[in-house]
Image (cartoon, rainbow, N blue to C red):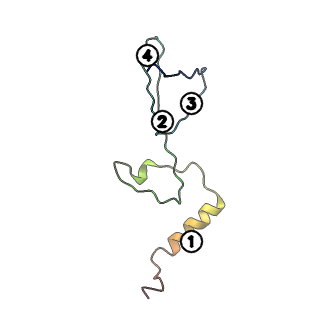
Amino acid sequence: MDIAEPVPLKVGQVLIFPLQLVHGGGTNASRRTRFSTDIRLANSLAPVEWSRGVRKEYFVPLCTSAVTRSAQAFLAANAEAPTEASA
């Protein structure tokens, strides 16, 4: 804590940092209520390992581009198509 540096924020501002950052909130000695939230972003086409308590239903699409919709349609249509090696 001796080398910790507070980040001054004004009402309405947000601080975003990666999960790898070592952080601590200290003690809330004021009468103001503070809160935090855990927001995780994942590319919808990235291979995500659903493990350690993380499940697919935890993620909700924020937006979807036309390219992503096309890729999802292609992947869905070819999900069970045999490959040359298995044919």
Mark 4 — residue?
28
Residue mark closest to the camera, 4 vs 1: 4
Could you classify mark 2 by the number of other residues whose Cα lies within 10 Å: few (under 14), some (14-19), or many (20 or more)?
A: few
Residue 44 position, x and y percent, is: 53, 56
Q: CA distance from mark 1 to mark 3?
A: 38 Å
Furthest residue in direction front, as rendered? 3
Q: Establish if 30 lies above or below 37.
A: above
- Mark 3 nearby-residue class (10 Å; few <14, some 14–19, many ≥20): few
Q: Nearer the viewer, mark 3 or mark 2?
A: 2
Residue 55 in the image, given as x and y percentages of width and height: 39, 52
N-term mark: 1 or 3 = 3
* Lower position in the chain sequence, tag 3 or tag 2: 3
The answer to which of marks 4 and 2 sits earlier in the sequence is: 2
Relative depth, front residue between 15 and 55: 15
Asked whether disc 2 touches disc 1, contact meaning CB atoms under 8 Å apart, the reply is no
C-alpha separation, residue under disc 4 versus residue under disc 1: 51 Å
Q: Kindly identify which residue carries mark 1.
A: 74
Tell me: residue 62, above or below residue 31: below
Please tell me whether mark 3 sits on a helix, a strand or a loop: loop
The residue carrying pointer 1 sits among few (fewer than 14), some (14 to 19) or many (20 or more) residues within 10 Å by Cα, namely few
Residue at which label 2 appears: 21
Closest to the observer, 26 or 37 = 26
Q: Amino acid at mark 4?
A: Asn
